[in-house]
Amino acid sequence: MFRFAVGLVTVFLTVSHAKVQPAATEGAYGRLTTDARVYRPLDKVTVHIEGRAKGDAACRIKVADPNQRIYFEAGAALTNNRGETSFMAGGPLGAHYIYLWFPGEKRYSRYLNFQLEAETAIESGDADFDKLYPFTREAMRLGRRQYESNRGRFVGYISADTWHFDGIWLRDWIYGLPAYRYWETEMSCGIDRFLEQQKENGQVPDGIERDGRTWRVGLESDVEYIMTLGVWQTWQATGDNAWLERAMPKLERALNYIRTDPKHWDEKNQLVKRQHSCDTWDYDIDGARDRGTSRHVVATCDQSGYYLAFRAMQKMYEALGKPEQAARWASEAGAYRARAAELLWDGTKFLHHVHLDPTIEHGDFDERAQLAMGNTWAMTRGLATDAQARSIIGEYKRRRKQTGDAYPWWSLQPGYPDRLGYWKQPHQLQGAYANGGLMPWVGGELCRSAFLFGRESYGVELLRQYAGHLRRTGGAQVWYWPDGTPGFRTTNEVSYAGWGMAQWVDALVGGLAGINDLEARMRKVEIAPRWVATGTARVRAIARYAVSDGYAAYRMTLDQAAKRVEMEFTGSGESAEFRVLLPEGRRAKAVIVGGQPVKFSQTEMDRSRYATFTAKLAGVDTVRIEYE
């Protein structure tokens, strides 16, 4: 009771403490809690439930993704008004919803959010595989550069040995994309800066300095296909069709330039040509500086690049809903591949190159016997058939055994002998740099090829070799001498060569773990796990584009005693094409997805056998493969 005076009158007020009504408290609605606020795909989420104050014996839980699509629903019994249920988190990243429903109610009683977040990761319990991606991300980010130019921001990744210390080579940057796409959020601005510098005739620069100046090495014939592949793979990560639409006319001009300029196009063979160089590298054997106007060859490295670029044009036009343009590029790609293979395949491998100028001579050195680094691209870019790829892989294994070199990562094997007198600089002698040095990117492409073409055990062997190399040396340089000694060419050599480290990430994520984007933003993915080749019993794999939240993830358990493979899978997309490697000598006898048998096929890759089938991506689902 309070008392106060108003004039001569004393007023007494009594404050009534009204009884709190249950309808206005949490007790009227029940309660939901989880054991965490943030989860990763395929994490187990445990929901703790409290019934209403009046007492409840049962309830129902519904879980929805950020688009309000229900992907888990189950009843739960309540004992003493308490209970719990659990589910695996999956589907699109972002805020997910847990709804609490009570019997007979027309509306949910409570809801609770949690965040689903993802980052690319491999978790197998084997350090050779699990540490490779985080090590690469940490190292390659040292080479990330962000420039603010008058045209806008420019983000790219440096070469690990270039004299262009403060500039970006297109090739080294784009060849780092198979790794940096998983953590980089500034994916397209660097591409824009290069396309803005395109010449009227369609030519694209080799590189851009911090201050905006550009350069182009005259003999280079690969720049236009690299730009095309850069746009394609960047668009895959972003899914930005409007950006892609703006880029396509510039890619058309670039590819038209390379197929019409006399320095770069061989009319007789209808293939791209280049000045005589060490495979894809940027100097002629005798140091000629005629800017690519003579001494021409047709090189395998360029043919695989343009074949894949034409296929990329097809895929990009299909995504933009332009079937006529897509068909034109599909036809161009098929014909180009046939011409290149007919000219360059020697029965065991693809030739280093074919001379177009009779003045190029190598004395008694048999250049046709060289195993050129472009052979690895021939496999991963689709120039080689399955049988050709297995022949090439066999040749790499044979030469490693024959030479005893540290790794089968040769730029050329053998390089041009010093007795020919082509070069005087130490880094250009036989066994060095592009003249026979060991290059990590070659090993990475060879490793991925082994996974793609039925040599999975060899792919695992190569991955373990590389993991051991990282442990011993702390990084990957552009090149090594044949005995594994680090090679130095400039004062700017660093041990985080993106063009090299990225190819091993691609071999791990796309090869061994087998997660590959078949369209863009991982709307349609391939899941082709090859863990059987490692002996690993349990693994979790996640691949995620940081720029767009596109991802796919799975858990896999191999139970050899029970003769089955079990998986849980999820992702942000719509469907997955599964190709699951089975233990050697085994055949699948049943595939069950979400508890229901599905049609499948046995896909054979030489001595390897895969169970192949398709499944939708909707929340979290399960797979069981029974084999015999």
Image (cartoon, rainbow, N blue to C red):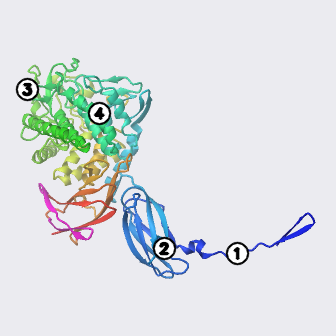
Please tell me how crowded label 1 is: few (under 14), some (14-19), or many (20+) other residues with Cα within 10 Å: few
Looking at this view, name the residue that lies furthest to the top: 290
Q: Could you say which is closer to the camera, residue 3 or residue 42? A: 3
**Residue bounds of the magenta highlight:** 586-607
Residue in view at x 34 percent, y 42 percent:
240
Q: Which mark is residue 18?
A: 1
* Residue 398 makes an appearance in the image: yes
Which circle, 4 or 3, is nearer the viewer? 3
Residue in view at x 14 percent, y 33 percent:
352
Q: Could you say which is closer to the camera, residue 223 or residue 494? A: 223
- Amino acid at the residue labelled 3: Lys
Contact flag, marks 3 and 2 (Cβ < 8 Å): no
Please tell me how crowded label 2 is: few (under 14), some (14-19), or many (20+) other residues with Cα within 10 Å: many
Dot 2 or dot 1, earlier in sequence = 1
For residue 426, side relative to residue 30 (left or right): left
Q: CA distance from mark 1 to mark 3?
A: 98 Å
Position of the N terminus, as image quadrant, is bottom right
Dot 1 or dot 3, earlier in sequence = 1
Residue in view at x 18 percent, y 33 percent:
302
Position of the C terminus, as image quadrant, is bottom left
* Secondary structure under the numbered disc 3 in the rendered image: loop
Dot 3 or dot 2, earlier in sequence = 2
* Secondary structure under the numbered disc 4 in the rendered image: helix
Residue 436 percent coordinates (x, y): 21, 33
The residue labelled by disc 4 is: 171
| Placement of 440 over or under 13, stated as above or below | above
The residue labelled by disc 3 is: 268
| Placement of 223 over or under 596, stated as above or below | above
The residue labelled by disc 2 is: 49
Magenta run includes residue 240: no
- Amino acid at the residue labelled 2: Ile
Which circle, 1 or 3, is nearer the viewer? 1
